[in-house]
Amino acid sequence: MSTYKIDTAHSEITFKVKHLMITNVTGNFNKFDATMESEAADFSDAKISFEADVTSISTNNEQRDGHLKSDDFFAAEKFPTLGFTSKSITKKSEENYALTGDLTIRGITKTIELAVAFGGTMTDPYGQVKSGFEISGKINRKDFGLNWSAVTEAGGIMLSDEVKLNLSVQMIKQ
């Protein structure tokens, strides 16, 4: 069994939410950790765990970030981390997988499915073996108690319920 740790310097954990239903606001978590265990060279038996520090959320707007950390959204004081633990991984093709697991936000756990594209494995100039993955999916924020909502004067919706997840991940073989 090989263990892999996330290379935080070469990984991004981002999300997108529609604002006013016309544009996307992108945010990310700056502090996170992930571990993967796999025996198979193609990662078809991978077990993955991931955790992000909610207080590290950034949308390039301090006021909005503060609101996201508040009880209206992530309630960061009560729930300082969010996490994902894999349950299964299914190989769809040479490079594509379906990853199923439990996502926990605000103490609420739901099973979600993520699409994983395997980008390949390389040895960097320092002799570290690295594997790359692009992971995407979507969740309904209200399933996890991120319920804040507002309506514009014209009756439009401020924020979509759907949140798109996009992770670019490099894993380092330990």
Image (tube, helix red, strand yellow):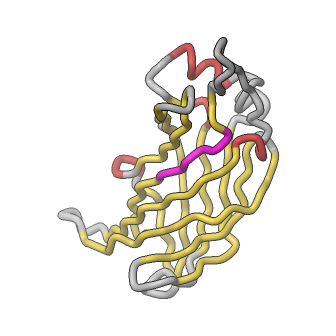
Asked whether 82 or 129 is in front, the reply is 82
Q: Which residue is at a point 34% across and 68% down the rendered structure image?
A: 130
Asked whether 142 or 150 is in front, the reply is 150
Name the image quarter holding the C terminus: bottom left
Mark count: 0
Q: Position of residue 133 (x, y in %)?
A: 41, 65
Give the main secondary structure, helix, strand or loop, of the magenta stretch.
strand
| Up/down of 53 relative to 97, above or below | above
Q: Which residue is at a point 61% across and 50% down the rendered structure image?
A: 51
Q: Position of residue 30 (x, y in %)?
A: 48, 37
Question: Which image quadrant is residue 73 in?
Answer: top right
Q: Position of residue 86 (x, y in %)?
A: 66, 68
Q: Which residue is at a point 49% across and 78% down the rendered structure image?
A: 2
| Up/down of 158 relative to 24, above or below | above
Question: Which image quadrant is residue 99 in?
Answer: bottom right
Q: Position of residue 98 (x, y in %)?
A: 57, 74
- Which residue appears farthest toward the bottom when viewing the image? 40
> Residue 146 in magenta?
no
Name the image quarter holding the N terminus: bottom right
Q: Could you tell whether 17 is left or right of 67 in the image?
A: left
Q: Which residue is at a point 23% across and 65% down the rendered structure image?
A: 124
| Up/down of 22 relative to 154, above or below | below
> Residue 163 in magenta?
yes
Q: Could you tell whether 164 is left or right of 120 in the image?
A: right
- Which residue appears farthest toward the front when viewing the image? 154
Span of residues in magenta? 161-166
